[in-house]
């Protein structure tokens, strides 16, 4: 009897043209490409040439640009290939709702929320890189994944490290989780020096090569602040169980502490492909062509306590964690608004945290996040307020 051909794993990559997306396609290529994986949909935003090239290379069924004004360009680039195209929010949802069993959620920002929830609701396994799903929608997002029946596998290197170090049958003995932070390019700078930071300085991360938003977030430690909130929802821990430690070499990706005093950690060279590969083949480990740790060359690993005066973002994350409700969504949206104003050179580097704090304080009485509509309402309001304050600061700076 003729053996049935092995079925290929069906995948979709939301945000394929970004830093995580490109690394995801590299891992997929390393692990067998179209012979082993059937790519249903790829999505991007402004980088149409790359999206079209990826869609052809991966033999995707659908390519989507979030930017409706670029749809004609995408169609033209894929003419004659048989690859369908779509655009805008509805196009992203169409991609998420295709029948892929594994979906990489790597769209940057709140734009990633709706398509990731759509994929989660229909039961796909979600490889989660996008932070906003957990930071803004928290419990609602976790509930959507549970209701759908798929698995939630973290891709952020810190959460992947915790996921790998957290043994399911030892959860009762979990005492704390320790998120490591590189400290970014301004780890040793004074606040006076940080006041002069430019976008080019903030985007140059010492260890990781990443997208603009997360690079600036690493420099301000807002990225770590978002990760603290993510950790709470992913691992169901209290704010008191979440620690942050600065580790400039970015070799220990994070740790789990148990009640017997043991600490389990996951180590590796700073390369997102390890966490992406783990999320793709979980619970097995793939064979990947990434750099191996050379302990003799490494020689030492340093750790230091974070400074919450120079990096107020960590203190703000604790506030958001303690207050709960929509404060995560508020912090996230205010930070996105402040980040936008910073990259447009309207405000200074330190203004970002001040804007976020002012918006969070003004919105403590916002109704709790009972539905996604509540989350979107808090997001819109926080963004509006952040824009208003940024405008005020920009006008003052011009004087
Ligand atoms: P990038 O900025 O490199 O890529 C973002 C992706 O989202 C691109 O495909 C981009 O398309 C697309 N995109 C941008 N704007 C929109 C929009 N409005 N609607 C739909 N799609 C859009 O980001 P990263 O890959 O660095 O990060 C992706 C997510 O993963 C972020 O949430 C980040 O915090 C998280 N993350 C990233 C890590 C990293 O190492 N980079 C590590 C851990 C988490 P296009 O490029 O075509 O414009």
Image (spheres, rainbow, N blue to C red):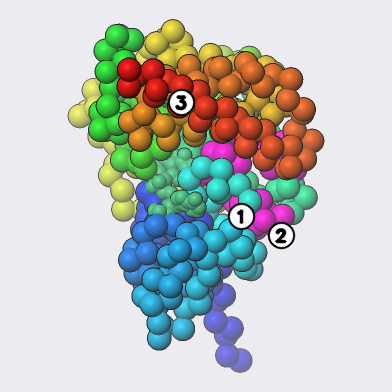
Residue picked out by circle 1: 115
Residue 152 x %, y %:
62, 46
Please give left or right for residue 211 compared with residue 107 in the image.
left
3 or 1: tag closer to the N-terminus: 1
CA gap, disc 3 and disc 2:
39 Å
| Magenta stretch: dominant secondary structure | helix
Residue 276 x %, y %:
45, 49
CA gap, disc 3 and disc 1:
29 Å
Residue at 28% from the left image edge and 22% from the top image edge: 197
Residue picked out by circle 3: 390
Membership of 142 in magenta stretch: yes
Quadrant the N terminus occupies: bottom right
Please give left or right for residue 195 compared with residue 12 in the image.
left
Q: Does the residue at mark 3 contact the one at mark 2 (Cβ under 8 Å)? A: no
Residue picked out by circle 2: 122
Residue at 73% from the left image edge and 42% from the top image edge: 372
2 or 1: tag closer to the N-terminus: 1
**Residue 59 in sight:** no
Asked if the residue at label 2 sits under 8 Å from ligand 1, the reply is: no
Range of magenta residues:
116-143
**Residue 73 in sight:** yes
Q: 3 or 351: which is nearer to us?
A: 351
Secondary structure beneath label 1:
helix
- Looking at the image, how many numbered discs can be counted on the residues? 3
3 or 2: tag closer to the N-terminus: 2
Label 3 neighbour load within 10 Å: few <14, some 14-19, many 20+ = many
The correct choice, above or below, for 370 with respect to 68 in the image is: above
Mark in front: 2 vs 1 = 1
What is the residue that sits farthest to the bottom in this orientation? Answer: 1
Residue at 46% from the left image edge and 25% from the top image edge: 390
Asked if the residue at label 1 sits under 8 Å from ligand 1, the reply is: yes
Q: Which of the 4 image quarters holds residue 30?
A: bottom left
């Amino acid at each position: 009897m003729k053996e049935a051909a092995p079925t290929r794993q069906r995948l979709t990559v939301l945000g394929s043209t970004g830093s995580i997306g490109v690394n995801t396609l590299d891992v997929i290529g390393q692990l067998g490409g179209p012979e082993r994986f059937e790519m249903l949909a790829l999505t991007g935003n402004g980088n149409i040439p790359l999206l079209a090239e990826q869609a052809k290379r991966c033999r995707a069924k659908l390519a989507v640009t979030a930017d409706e004004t670029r749809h004609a360009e995408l169609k033209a680039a894929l003419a004659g290939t048989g690859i369908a195209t779509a655009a805008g929010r509805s196009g992203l949802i169409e991609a998420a709702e295709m029948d892929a069993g594994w979906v990489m959620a790597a769209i940057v920002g709140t734009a990633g929320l709706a398509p990731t929830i759509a994929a989660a609701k229909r039961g796909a396994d979600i490889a989660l890189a996008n932070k906003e799903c957990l930071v803004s929608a928290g419990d609602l997002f976790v509930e959507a994944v549970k209701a759908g029946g798929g698995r939630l596998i973290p891709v952020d290197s810190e959460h992947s490290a915790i996921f790998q170090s957290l043994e399911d049958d030892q959860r009762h003995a979990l005492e704390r989780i320790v998120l490591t932070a590189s400290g970014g390019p301004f780890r040793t700078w004074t606040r006076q020096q940080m006041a002069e930071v430019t976008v080019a300085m903030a985007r140059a991360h010492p260890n990781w090569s990443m997208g603009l938003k997360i690079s600036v977030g690493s420099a301000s430690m807002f990225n770590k602040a978002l990760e603290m909130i993510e950790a709470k929802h992913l691992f169901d821990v209290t704010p008191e169980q979440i620690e942050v430690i600065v580790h400039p070499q970015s070799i220990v990706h994070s740790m789990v502490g148990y009640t017997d005093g043991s600490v389990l950690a996951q180590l590796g060279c700073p390369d997102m492909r390890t966490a992406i590969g783990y999320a793709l083949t979980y619970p097995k480990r793939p064979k990947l062509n990434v750099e191996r740790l050379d302990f003799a060359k490494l020689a030492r690993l340093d750790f230091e306590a974070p400074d919450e005066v120079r990096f107020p973002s960590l203190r703000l994350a604790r506030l958001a964690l303690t207050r709960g409700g929509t404060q995560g969504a508020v912090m996230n949206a205010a930070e996105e608004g402040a980040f936008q104003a910073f990259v447009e050179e309207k405000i200074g580097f330190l203004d970002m945290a001040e804007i976020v704090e002012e918006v969070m304080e003004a919105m403590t009485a916002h109704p709790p996040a009972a539905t996604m509509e509540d989350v979107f309402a808090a997001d819109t309001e926080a963004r509006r307020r952040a824009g208003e304050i940024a405008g005020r600061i920009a006008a003052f700076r011009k004087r």
